[in-house]
Amino acid sequence: MSWNDPNASSEAQKYDNPIPSRELILSTISEKGEVTHQQLAKAFDIDDPDQFDALGNRLKAMARDGQVNREGRPYRYRTVTTQDVVSGTVSAHPKGFGFVVLEDMPDLFLHEKQMRWVFNGDTVDAIGTSTDNRGRTEGRIVDVTARRQNHFIGTLAKDDEGYSVELSSPNNHQPITVADDNVQALDIKPGAPVKVDIIDWPNQHEFATGKITEVLSDDNDRELIIETTLLNYDIPSEFSAAALKQANSYQEPTEKDFKGRKDLRDLPLVTIDGEDARDFDDAVFAEKRSGGNYRVLVAIADVSHYVTPNSALDKDAYERGTSVYFPHRVIPMLPEVLSNGLCSLNPDVDRLCMVADIKISRAGNVTGYEFYPGVMHSQARLTYNQVNDYFANPKDNSVPKSLTGNKDVKKSVDTLHQLYELLIKKREQRHAMEFETVETYIKFNEKGGIAAIMPRTRGDAHKLIEECMLLANTCAANFALKNELPVLYRNHDKPDNEKSMRIHEYAKNFGLPFPEESPTQADYQRIIEATKERPDAISIHSMLLRSMMQANYSPDNIGHFGLAYDEYSHFTSPIRRYPDLMLHRAIKAKVTGSKQPVMDFSLDGAGTQTSDTERRAEKASRFVESWLKCHYMKDHVGEDFEGVVTSVTNFGLFVTLTDLYIDGLVHISNVGDDFFVYDEQQQQLIGKDKGGLFGLGDLVKVKVAGVNMDLLQIDFDLIEKLKSSAMNQSKKGQAKKDSSKKSSRNNGNGKGNNKKS
């Protein structure tokens, strides 16, 4: 041994043929900056093959443990510095592994061993150690810098080692041990749902320990999973005492509150919402003007009058960022005394509002607008179904008298419908995207179980209100830009080149051109229009939707690609979205000549916070809906259903059941008696031996094979293919034609089938 190793005696005791210790290797690499395995062996005068291999194994272990970085081919090793440390959020997978999610670089993959001391959502410092055979950068956690939550809901379990609380996905990798006397004091039986607080966090050798603080009722699975989800996604569900005190201190508005506001109480403003809506934050009115022009008023509840800057209410609202919607339950951004009371434009009461007063030409162009604080008195609370019935038949008995019996309301609604037809043409002209998708809602029975899953229909009334809201949002964005107001814009970037290339290849299926990069709205709309009447339209449009970027909030405007607007903001829902509240404050300060509010947060910080809380709300809502659907399907294992192929992957087919709108997976091993290969460009599975073909839009019959509640996955077995989509029928026909031509050519020249004989 020709190296001077301070740990030489320790190494000699451990190994018959010792190699340099980790400490010596680190100091040597540090001196040289960067070395290969071979260079390091040469530096230590190692020429024995066994020692050479042992050195290589030690280097791999040091890379795995985050002591050195390994890059390139051949591998080059260097010491880890503080510059290698990145901060991110842990995303746990139900199967036990996870990722460190990073903003500006690829995520780090975490093995089960690394996941032992973290929960989903924890913030960690980590380093990339090496690249696995799937091209993923493996990560090692250096430190847990913030815990997402310290309260959990799980199920009490018992084994030979004692009691523990088993958590549901995405924390099912992390049981929490609890003391026997804690369980006995509360008289809890295994299998009971409980709430547990963390006492000691886990490490790589021991599980977390906790204390059960509450035994929960399992009478209603829906409520229990919502409570669990609120904790798992760190969504606040209780308002602070100070916020509630502030909210409850407000009274019905009086003449004092009306000062400086435009009085709109004589205008026939009405709200039009869904049947189950509880808060009404927008009211509309329209009238014809000379020359065929229009005036439309969009009145939005003046939440900023009550939720004052940096107040207790404001801080709670900022922390929540948005209301969160679950089936039959809402976690509101504001206390209900405001969201369903003083800030709800209920009929027959005076309400404070911020108004977008917009003038539109008979060609559908905005010719002017103004914003001002007002006071209004809604003359009708109408629903989408009622207004749709009125449009279909004005004399329908189901249409309420508040519409048909009030000539001013009736005239305004008629004018709104005329304006809507004009705005729809403008929408088409600018190529705003209108995807064919199905939105569903869940109906529950008296016991809290699912009674039915129903599609939501969008008639003219729904679309009319949507166009009015788009008008107000675009005018607000234009006003904010002109006046350089400190607000957040609602941005939606164009698709990146990788996603554009995928759609370019996919569009060939329809014989339609699509650019390989930098597509326009017109390029998307061309495919949408060409496919919207097809039976597989929903599958095709879902594919297009998945190619789009996510929208977000930012103080810098880049426009909204999907809606085809150069400038766009959110103005119309300050009850449930914090960016709308910020915009209201800024516009009100400008039009009233007041000082712009100085907030406790930065604009960039608000953009990140509101974008993150929006994603959090979406994920939580999707999780609960998926859980409920999986829970429902547990009672239907073994039953047959018809469905449509909505996604094709290299591991199988995702099928949406036709009547239930529930998704499940037919694994590729259960597709059929053939060897199937995945064609990514065509989005198909193709049988190599028997010529079977499965693609988007195919109608199939499946059997429910099983439900995995941890993975929230429903597995189907394919029974039969009922009908190919139009696209796949034409491809199969073309394939047969090509095969026939080939056979004919072979027979004609004396080759082919007779060759072997």
Image (cartoon, rainbow, N blue to C red):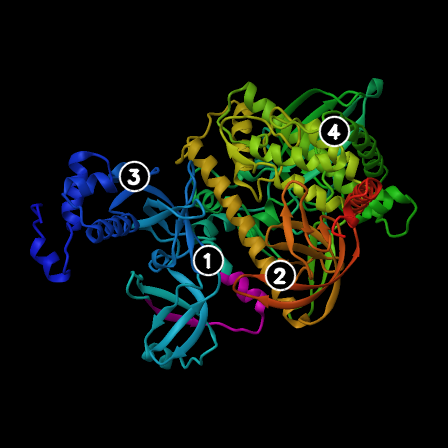
Mark 2 and mark 1: Cα distance apart in space: 34 Å
Mark 4 and mark 1: Cα distance apart in space: 40 Å
* Residue with the mark numbered 4: 427
Measured as percent of width and height from the top left, residue 677 is found at 63, 50
Measured as percent of width and height from the top left, residue 386 is found at 81, 48
Magenta span includes 219:
yes
In the picture, measured across the screen, residue 519 lies left or right of residue 268, that is left
Residue 669 image label: 2
Measured as percent of width and height from the top left, residue 407 is found at 86, 38
Q: Earlier in the sequence, mark 3 or mark 4?
A: 3
Q: Range of the magenta residues?
A: 208-228
Q: Nearer the viewer, residue 53 or 298?
A: 53
Q: Earlier in the sequence, mark 1 or mark 3?
A: 3
**Residue at image location 34% in from the left, 64% down from the top:** 198
Q: Earlier in the sequence, mark 4 or mark 2?
A: 4
Q: Residue 683 appears in which quarter of the rendering?
A: top right
Q: Is residue 489 visible?
A: yes
Residue 232 image label: 1
Q: Is residue 171 above or below residue 270?
A: below
Q: Residues within 10 Å of mark 3 (few under 14, many from 20)?
A: few
Mark 3 and mark 2: Cα distance apart in space: 42 Å
Q: Nearer the viewer, mark 3 or mark 4?
A: 3
Badges 3 and 4: C-beta atoms under 8 Å apart? Answer: no
What residue type is disc 3 on? Asp
